[in-house]
Image: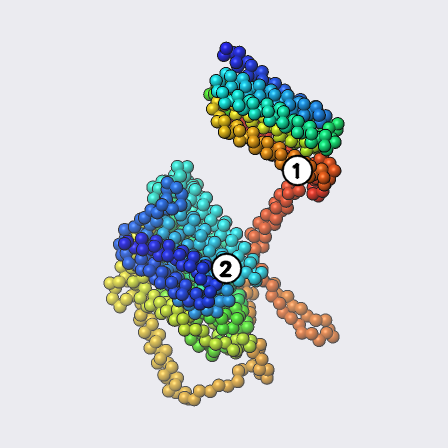
Amino acid sequence: MTPLTAALWSIGALLGVGGLAAALARGGDASRFIYCLCGVLCLILFGAAVVPRTAVALTATLPLGLPWIGAHFRLDVLSAFFLAVVNLGGAIASLYAIGYGAHEKHPSRILPFFPAFLAGMNLVLLADDAFSFLVAWEFMSLSSCALVLAHHHDAENRRAGFIYLIMASFGTLALLMAFGLLAGSVGGYSFSAIREATLGEYWKPGLALALTLLGAGSKAGLVPLHIWLPLAHPAAPSHVSALMSGVMTKVAVYGFVRVAFDLLGPPAFWWSMPLLTIGAITTVLGILSATIQSDLKKLLAYSTIENVGIIFVALGLALAFKANGMALPAALAFTAALLHVFNHSLFKSLLFFGAGAVLNATGERDIERLGGLIHSMPRTAFLFLGACVAISALPPLNGFVSEWLIFQAVLLSPSLPQWSLKLLVPAAGVALALSAALCAGCFVRAFGVAFLGRPRSITAKNARETDLWSLAAMSGLLALCLLAGLLPSYLIDTISPAARAFVGGHVPTQGDIPWMSIVPIAESRSSYNGLLVFIFILFSAFLSAWIVRLLGTHALRRGPAWDCGYPDPSPVTQYTGSSFAEPIRRALGHVAFVARDHLDMPPPGDTRPARFGVEIRDRVWDYVYSPIQMSVEFGADQLNKTHFLTIQGYLTLVFIALVSLLLVVAIWP
Amino acid sequence: MGNLSFDVAHLFAGSLVLVSFMLLYQDRMSGLINIFTAHAVILSFSVGWQAYIQHSPHLFVTAAIAIIFKAVMIPVSLQRIMERLRIHRDIEIIGGIGVTMLLGICLVALSLVVMLPATAAADPLAREDLAFALSVVLLGLLMMVTRRNAISQVIGFMSLENGLILAATGAKGMPLVVEISVAFSVLIAFIVIGIFLFRIRERFDTVDVQELDRVRGGRR
């Protein structure tokens, strides 16, 4: 049994579990059983992805789908990598859900779709012809949409589901057209046929790339197609939002890589420019929007947008280097992108799990109503802090490694021959640096306001630590984050076959370097050793703690909170999330959104308090989606009149249509 | 023989188009039914002639169906319906007969322009037949568009269907099953429409479809 057959059987089994869940979900304690099954199947799929160490691609054809064509599946180094990412995320999400799903009031709305969603994502990764790819892609979209709509009694969730559905259909449409263009008039829809065909003319590959960027970007969350993420992620249950954010956006990245690096053929240098530009804009706008959010899951969703931007910048760099035949820098950027895919899937899942644990314990997503959770949920707080450190790209955790590699690739940009790229890449690098700094600020705020200080609401005060299953899942993720940060050399070596296959070069083998350092280019240029940094941090931290305890008092004291001199014990006097974000909102807010402060000052003699309010509107909504919405509504209004025609009117329409078609036939040369 | 058969087929098909024109301007209800009967009779002659020159006896069955259903049963029952609805002496107001006729001429020209180049490789007999058949279909549609009375619209629909039969018999080798099923579907459509006519009449005291639109709140 080859790994591919094992994978396909497991995907079939996942679909079967979905059907089983639909049958079982009504009766009692099915959710634990179903999530266990999902977890086991994900582990099998993970194994199938990890076991083959060869660069040889496995293929299979199933008699499904279009008659005479069938469905083609292929497991190569790239899909194996993404398969591993998806199923690691899926297995841990299932483990988390064993605990988290017990609190679910309506498990029958989630259980059947969760395995289906996992199966859909896996199928996208294995598909080897455009038809199965698109079917799997749409299956993934629809099953996740069903999960977003799990709590559909809330009008906001219905809106989120609707917008998600629209964006997903738009993305699939764009991808459909891209594949149509790639297949050409001959219509070879299998990827091997597309690979062999050359698009030839100058505009065709560019158009196909643009359509793929639209299609994959709408799923991954590139600005301005990101609007569904901050709506859909809070709406879905937390383990699903972790999957959607940490894993499904990566499937979209896979789709883009598959087309741009594989199917489109040799790249032109200007392909990288839209990627770099859009990626940089996405990064900055994403993290700026995240910084001002007070809804914890919305904040995480915006941070996902930022990370997707980072990945796309790295992919753009890889394309630029590849187009210029610079194999090593291209491999570096490509490796960095894939490594960031892996890393982001780990810490973003962990963050969403933490947010889910907080949501379960307090019923709150708004960080302005949390606070002090470190006392009531110390373990969750520690794990969440770890993920915050990782996503802020602080060594020794894994976020640092991939972002550091991306910066290494950015620093190689002066050797690019094109002046446009020489100017654009450092600008994108500046955007990355800015967003890295803002990201740290954003997560200091998220952790500080939600977990530190005093509780701002009764529910936050009465919070309980989350269950053991969830804690186990989160601890596993943090351990993986730490491992990936300490031993990145093995991950880089794992990615290098993919880099060799897709950009034609690879980063020097890292596993042989002593002391587990990573040296992406040359020793003289830069190297990083996570293990040493970790040991140093541990050592210096313990040393300073020891010295402090040695010099200071041993007694543990708990004093009253400092209240700026006012004897008001209310927790409202604490520094809030909005206060934390205010300087950034003032300084940079106008880039990303329209923030309008308004002051409601009572007239003299009125004793009611004055109120400050902030109104924040997304520019993307104002400039992109509102016009689209207005034109659609206008068109619908116009077409609506045809619902009220007379019988003769309808007959006349038919008549005119027929006659004009005949006229076309008559006039057509 | 070759020339004669072509000329006779041409004659019948051309007469069918001519009768379609007569249907277009006829505003008396009973006259309309009589002309429709003539339409059906000419169709059956045409089909019969095709059966004779193509040596395909099953087309005689088609011709018989056309005579029995379209030239006898449907006109008789339409007449009875009209008598029961007391509209057999009505005169329908048709706006702009001249314009309608001109439009009809344009449609015939259009169908010739479309059909003759499109079927350049086909048998000349079939070509002419198809062109005439398309004209009859378009004229039937035009009649449905220009009439306001439900019965005239039904007759327009029936004449349109006659055009389809003409086209089908002109092209050799249409199976009998298709003919019969088309004939029956038309009959069923006729029955359904007849029932609806009575229901409409019961409700609104008229079969003028404009009244229906008024009830539906239609806009002009």
Where does residue A413 sit, x and y in percent of width and height? 37, 54
Amino acid type shown at disc 2: Val
Tell me whether circle 2 and circle 1 mark residues in contact (CB < 8 Å).
no
Residue displayed at 32% across by 74% down: A535
Residue A2 drawn above or below residue B176: below
Q: Specify whether B15 is left or right of A94.
A: right
Q: Specify whether B134 is left or right of A82.
A: right
Residue B196 circle label: 1
Amino acid type shown at disc 1: Phe
Say whether residue B119 is visible.
Answer: no
Q: Is mark 1 on a helix, strand or loop?
A: helix
Residue A259 drawn above or below residue A528: above
Please, which chain is the residue tagged with disc 1 on? B
Residue displayed at 58% across by 80% down: A570
Which residue is identified by label 2? A148
Residue A395 drawn above or below residue A129: below
Near-viewer residue (A661 or A515): A661
Q: Specify whether A275 is left or right of A370.
A: left
Near-viewer residue (A21 or B96): A21
Q: Do labels 2 and 1 share a chain?
A: no
Say whether residue B154 is visible.
Answer: yes
